[in-house]
Image (cartoon, rainbow, N blue to C red):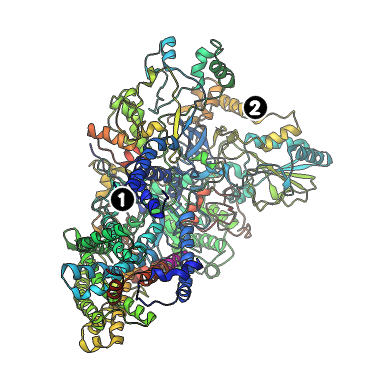
Amino acid sequence: MKARYGMVIDVDRCTGCGACMVACAAENNVPPAAQRATARTGITPMLVHKVSDGAEGEDRREAFLPVTCMQCEHETPCVTVCPQQAVQLDPATGIVMQMPQRCLGCRYCMTACPYHARYFNWWDPVWPQGMEKSLNPGVAVRMRGVVEKCNLCHARLHAAQEKAAAAGKRTIDQHDYAPACVEACPTGAITFGNLADENDSVSRAARSPEAFRLLARLGTEPKIYYKSKRPWVRALAEPHTAQSRKEVQHG
Amino acid sequence: MKLTRRDLFTWGGGAAAGLLLTPVPWKLLDDTSIWTQNWPWIPQPAHGPVEVKNSFCSLCPNGCGMRVRMAVGWPVGISGMPHHPVNQGALCPLGFGAHQLNWHPRRLRQVRYHGRASSWTEALVAFQKACAAGSVAIIDGYPGRAASSLFQSFCKQHGSYGVVLCTEERALGPYETWSGVPVTTLGYDLENTGTIVSFGAPLLDGWSAPGRFTRLWSERAAGMADPQLRLIQVEPAQSRTAACAWRWVRIAPGSEAALAAALARALREEHLAPEDTPMPPATLAESAARCCISIEAIRELARTMVARGPVLAISAESNSAVAALNVVLGAVGARGGIVCRRKRAESYAAADSLTGSFSAVLIDSSVPADFNPNIDAEVFRFAGWEGGPGRADWLLPAPGFLEELTDIPTAPASSIETYTIAVALAPPPPEMRSAAQFLAQVDPSAPLVEQVIHARCGQLFHARTGRLKREQSTAVSALDSPEMLKKELCHGAVWVDDPPRAGGIRCRLREWPQPSGAAPCAATWTTAWVPPVLPPLATKLYQESVLRETPPRSAI
Amino acid sequence: MSRSSMTFGFGFLTALAVGWFAFPYVLYVQRAQPLEFRHKTHADKSGVTECKDCHAFLEDGEFAGIPKTETCTACHADRIGTSRPEARLVDSYIKKGQEPAWLVYSRQPANVWFSHAIHTRRAGLKCAECHGAYGESDEVRTYEVNRISGYSRDIEGQSILRLRSAAPNGMKMSDCEDCHRKRSIEVGCLGCHQ
Amino acid sequence: MASAVLTDRRWIARGAERTSSARFALWLAPWAALLVLGIYAAGLCLYYGLNQTNMDNRFAFGLWIFLDLSVIALGAGAFFTGFLVYILGRADLKPILNAAVVLGFICYSGAVAVLMVDVGQPLRGWFTFWHPNTHSMLTEVTFCISCYLLVLTLEYIPVLLRNRQLGKGQPAAVFEYRLHHLVPVLAGLGAFLSFFHQGSLGGLYGVLRGRPFAFREGFSVWPSTFFLFVLSAIAVGPSFLMLVTAAVEKLTGRRQVPRELLRRLGFISGILLAVYVAAKSIDTLIWLNVTSPSVGFAPWEHYAYPPFGSALLFIEIVLFGLVPAGLLIYPRTARNRRWLLTGAALACCGILLNRFVMTVQTLALPTLAFDEFLSYIPSWQEVATFGGLIAYGVIVFSLSYRYLPLFGQEKREATDVSGR
């Protein structure tokens, strides 16, 4: 039976602590920043943005918005553009799978992604002497010159599948598989599940009136949903006008 | 016949044509690209079986429960321990990268005397000389551990013992002065509070055990228009906590005490507080001016905060005015307020209050790296990592993260008593020694940490109170031996005492206290952070993104 | 037959000769295994019949691979016989409690995820279908490694043309794909990569 | 080396007047230096990786892609002239054909070389041929460009063999002769391939559904930018050819092609440019009023960030589109050499601007509500690498001009004397 893994991120619960970002990097053997790396050349497959309603002073409202690969379902921008099938949409899980070993490093997929959720390895990964012992054996380290992104912690899916096979089961136990960011979030703001399953808590939350998706009108059917009770937060789904966007920046 | 250039060309042409019909070009094409996929200079994870072990974070005195993934005998991943009574499966961002700290380039790997390489024997000789010359001071940043008790017994003969408390406990200071109950026994009963007025305390940003309040907040407050738990954040700037709070009250920097006084006065004037509570001298107008908010705003705030009780005021640092406000609110000793845990811990001398002349100061590795003793003596500082701003004549390499056996006493400001044991998961490098091991060499008659822990398990077992919390919890009385108790604790179980009775602490105030205590520091995630360095992966938060400002104390 | 066409043909033939016969010798390095282990002898002497009796699974389904020395200690606590390899086994490994650094013929690169549990238990493959009848052989094969890619020759297959003969006939991605295609099993890239 | 320079007379076609070896060497020297610098910079990027550039995760494409697109567009003169001469039988353009071929060869080989530096893993380049993703415009580009480069090489060989020394001997003559008969076929093939990759280069951006600034609807699998790029390329190719010829004439101080030939090129260029401008305007209107708003991006959004104001659109369409078209078509201006060349130059600027906007503005504009508008300045390595490409072009063209019959009139003389 096919699954469609997705997330619902409750923006109202996010305190912007960044635990998801660190947990993600540790799980996926993302190296610490190179000396010259910046917010624009770093690798943060899970990235928490600080957003605001653009107001000033005491009535200014701020929130935190975790952004990762949206696992687009339809006309997935990165999948359609990759010249050598280094990205594919897995029909069995709905995961958009990035294959750094196949990647040519042309970065066309990065220009195609409206969420800027793809990251290029500008440097060779370097860990301090001996720290390679702390690498997760389930994930191969990427080399410089390739693109990477969130694969929904695929190593954990592997482990769950192997466990199931050893127990003689065909399908995995859903409790055995959750990405690192979901597990790490101290407020439980990120929930993960199978959108194909009608009664799954995630697919129910995704149908709630408070749920929204970023740039949904592009028609790429992202599988990462957000939800918030605050209207100004839900308004972030649509591109702002230049005016208010400037405010958002300079806030 | 002589070879012409043309012959050479033709021969080359033939060879080229022929080569295309051999595996050479194609195999080379394939192998070189495979080479790029396995560049020898790219580190690869080790092969081997993976297992998950329970342990506890010893990087700050909160001792959050962790589940540690181990591969080929090394920690490769960390996640929260869901059944932990205090942090409930949540960790701070630094916890998730902590397993890489032991390989931080700044790791202290040998004994240093004034910066140059030295040896343990020299350090030992120097320390013994100091002990002989006069009395020594031992400074502890994480009181209540087995090691701490060893320090204390050592100090009984050779000098005095002082502790550096974390901000959460320092903030409880006034109550100790007024009631005599030591801060290490006091806690906030957050779980039963209706409204929390935080005077700049980073409740959602690394305050106390990160999981404790964030979990509570996300269940009872997050995003709700009228939450069960109302969080009112009083702060000059919009911090993370302020951004997430139910209400953010913006005041002039440093006017927390003034606002507390104003609120107390407003409560009295509105007859929302008992008559016998002290009245602050300053008028509402004066305070309002000081805080740069209107009198109406203050009155309104006073009314809102008592609208849903129990109400509790929390300050970032020790602040007598905020403490007095709690007295006015009747939050001291009441349910949902400031409670006194069952087991009454002793009260410790604050490290910076140590007076008299000492010949040496020994600073445990649990003391924050920026602490400086105001004692003029030779400083022996134990540290896992170099680069702390703190003064040190001797820098002594201590075991790093998850490298030593230690017991985990109750977290600061927790309302319930807990106890558990963190076993060493990774072998420390040969040069490392903990302060306790060092002292054991000075005074061989002293017991070892292992023995103290064993003894404590014995006492716990015979006291027969509390429960062992794991996936399911079992009463201590149901266990049949201290060894069993110890074994359980070593494998991630946590001993939890019965909840505290209300009362147990009384504070009477004749008049409104003189403003005292430090101005609230901009406390954030790194306040309780002990090592001078951060986990390398913290770069994700402040270098590879703009989520966090670079923490001052970090050296990456 | 003009002179130029003769020179051309000569060059052509040289290239063929070099490419087909000399090249493989240059491309692969041969390495010796640390010990001389005979599967057949062990099977006969110990009565072990199943691969999994020695190459076991952990409870979470992970494949344990080559047994650790304590398995050997069961019989080889002290020397059996007087052969030199026996002596080396007992003295330099069992007594010291060290593991021999076996060169694994079928070791896949770090970017490959292969679950023995899924392939043997769910799909019911026999070990020999991929590893060949190595269990019945009575000699240690020399381990050959590709100078450039660093892969064991068993991964690339013995025949440089990658012509399929008896197993083991290569464990490259295309081999996995062929088998999956035969059984019409659809897995994406990350089904086998990590 | 010196001796080679001294004896290079015997390499020059008989009867062809060329400047002295010394002066020629002097002319080459600075370009050679620039080429060396470029190779060094490219070496840095290959050895240390692309952190040598100032590109980043948001500006994943930078200076290199912009200039590659431009160069390839300018090189379109090659296939288009071939197409006109052999397919449409415009024999009058023949004299300039060799020059066009060499120019095309330079542009394409150079662009491909820079692309190899631009990708993070050049050694995996062949994966595109082995595991092609047939839905990707980039696959189409890669296939067509590499094939067309092969075609250009084949077209270049006969020109090479016209050289006095290289052409010596009977087999070469036979070979050259055979190839010569192939040329029309090659021209047809080239035209076909070029049509598709010039187009798919435009498609690259047109299909970016995630970038409303670039995304366009289109016919079946091809977005409108596909056709616009083809059109703009063939419109500007002849102009560029014209400019280069004029430059050669200026440098050598000698007329290379009949006067009216340039005007004819200009006329063709002008007509196509006019058509392009018309098509582009219609496309822009549709995009601004239908495509972009339909996904929630207000039209003015795209031009709200200086320096990317709507002025750019005006410049691209009017100043660099309508104006040069007029100059090239209108007989009075077309007859005046200065105006003619100005028109050609403006046309070339137009295509540069268009490729720049498609590459840089597309990436600079925010998509998410909380994105920032970003800018980027290329590092010296990027600039130097491209300088190397320019130098390579100049050097190859100079050598070709000196030793090969590039331009019609001379070619006839030279071949007559050398008895072919």
Q: Which of D78 and B9 is in front in this view?
A: B9
Between circles 1 and 2, the one closer to the viewer is 1
Residue drawn at x 53%, y 29% as measured from the top left: B489
Residue D386 lies within the magenta run: yes
Q: What stretch is highlighted in magenta?
A: D377-389
Q: Nearer the viewer, residue D407 or B1?
A: B1
Is residue B518 positioned above or below D377 on the image? above
Q: Which of A79 and C90 is in front in this view?
A: C90
Q: Quadrant of residue C47?
A: top left
Residue drawn at x 57%, y 55% as measured from the top left: B324
**Residue C167 rendering spot, x and y as whole percentages:** 32, 26
Chain at numbered mark 2: B
Tell me the element at label 1: helix
| Mark 2 neighbour density, 10 Å: few (under 14) some (14–19) many (20 or more) | few
Residue drawn at x 57%, y 27% as measured from the top left: B463
Which residue in the protein does label 1 denote?
D128
Tell me the element at label 2: helix
Chain at numbered mark 1: D
Residue A121 lies within the magenta run: no
Identify the disc placed on residue B451: 2
Q: Is residue B118 visible?
A: yes
Is residue B204 positioned above or below C66 on the image? below
